[in-house]
Amino acid sequence: MTVKERFLKYVAIPTTSDENSPACPSSPCQWDLARELEKEMKEMGLSNVRVDEHAYVYGEIPANADAAPAIGLIAHMDTVDAVPGENIKAREIHYEGGDILLNEAQGIVMKEKDFASLRHHRGHDLIVTDGTTLLGGDDKAGIAEILTFCEYVLEHPEVKHGRICIGFTPDEEIGRGADLFDVGAFGADFAYTVDGGAIDEMEYENFNAASAKIKVNGFSIHPGSAKNKMRNAARMAMEFHAMLPAHEIPECTEGYEGFYHLCHIQGEEQQAEMQYIIRDHDMTKFQQKKDRMQKIAAYLNEKYGENTFELTLKDSYYNMRQKVEENFQVVERAMNALRACGLTPRCVPIRGGTDGARLSFMGLVCPNLGTGGCNGHGIFEYVSVNEMEKMVEVLKALVLEK
């Protein structure tokens, strides 16, 4: 089966995760892909294939070379819930430039001027959606590439390699992908997530991340008799937000610049609620952002009364750079593999997170490789077939002994 055929099969299986569910996996639909991958891996001939009670999928190819390292390859099965993830109508086009009409009936067009990555994919075969759903390249492209690589290895027993450890996780998109990952049983000396974008990117830095929830308790009374009595929770929530730095938001930041992102707000006079994510590559600045939120809440509680603002902060993951730099040969190995495949590697900071960030702090150093996917988490997501095929070659250069 080709990498394209695998990818199209996987994206047809909905796997939207649910951050409001405490279960793991957070959505029952993720079991459908987990079971399909288990079946395929067993039929392919991988060893020790298993799915645990939380839908983590594991397998391996035993070593046939002495003294070669055990290398892990990891991707995640779930997709984001911000965009519909069912009834995906994926199709392949040959792209020679210009805008792409995704949906004529609804007038949905992917414009080259809005998406600079398209200019780098002229002459490529692209898989796109009909503009009403996401595609699921994040991270089903990574799964397809890993298993296509595994199929090659199993069909060519003459190639030499150490133990190849495979892992597919649920719930990465809601920050829980590494929560129950069995690092010890996985058995890799080091690993790579295949969960990035451009295939020439080598990623080993990511945001430090936290979530913040603010509950605002007000006092509702008829506005006609509200003077000196009403405490409008919705308005007070706006006051809290206005005290955050106006330009430290995703729309105004790039590279290593951190931000506060208001991702949910609801409320009325009696009660309001806001949810934020906090991000920064620098740990000191990350802590300062959390401290600022606490100071704002304390100030407003002094102004309006104790427990008017209830702030809950929770760290999600940390910048893996610290752990990876202690084992930088893992990055160098990947960069050499990219060069061997005719690519010029670029080390770029991830403006997000991966399972690898958490895993690196769990004792499994795990930088991130690209997949050939672009515009993830939205209706304009697409994947380059050419780059998926190239990433399979990169994995061969990365894992197989010369």
Image (cartoon, helix red, strand yellow):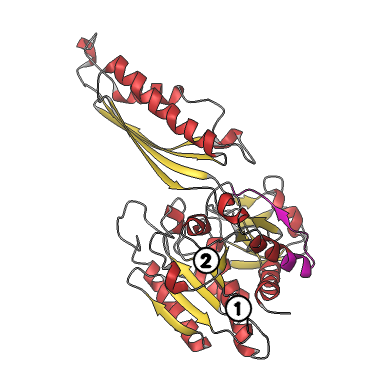
Looking at the rendered image, the quarter that the C terminus falls into is bottom right
Mark 2 neighbour class, 10 Å CA radius: few under 14, some 14 to 19, many 20 or more: many
Mark 1 neighbour class, 10 Å CA radius: few under 14, some 14 to 19, many 20 or more: many
Q: Which mark is residue 51?
A: none
In the drawing, does residue 72 fall left or right of residue 20?
right
Q: Position of residue 131 (x, y in %)?
A: 55, 55
Q: Position of residue 373 (x, y in %)?
A: 62, 60
At mark 2, the secondary structure is strand
Q: Position of residue 268 (x, y in %)?
A: 29, 28
Was residue 203 drawn as part of the magenta stretch in this picture? Answer: no
Farthest top residue in view = 227
Q: Relative to 382, does residue 214 appear above or below in the rendering? A: above
Amino acid beneath label 1: Thr
Residue bearing the label numbered 1: 148
Looking at the rendered image, the quarter that the N terminus falls into is bottom right
Work out whether mark 2 precedes mark 1 in sequence or the reverse, and give the earlier one. 2
The count of marks equals: 2
Q: In front here: 66 or 90?
A: 66
Give the magenta-colored segment's residue range.
336-350
Residue at 80%, 67% (x, y): give it. Answer: 342
Residue bearing the label numbered 2: 75
Q: Relative to 265, does residue 330 appear above or below in the rendering? A: below
Quarter of the image for residue 293 reads: top left
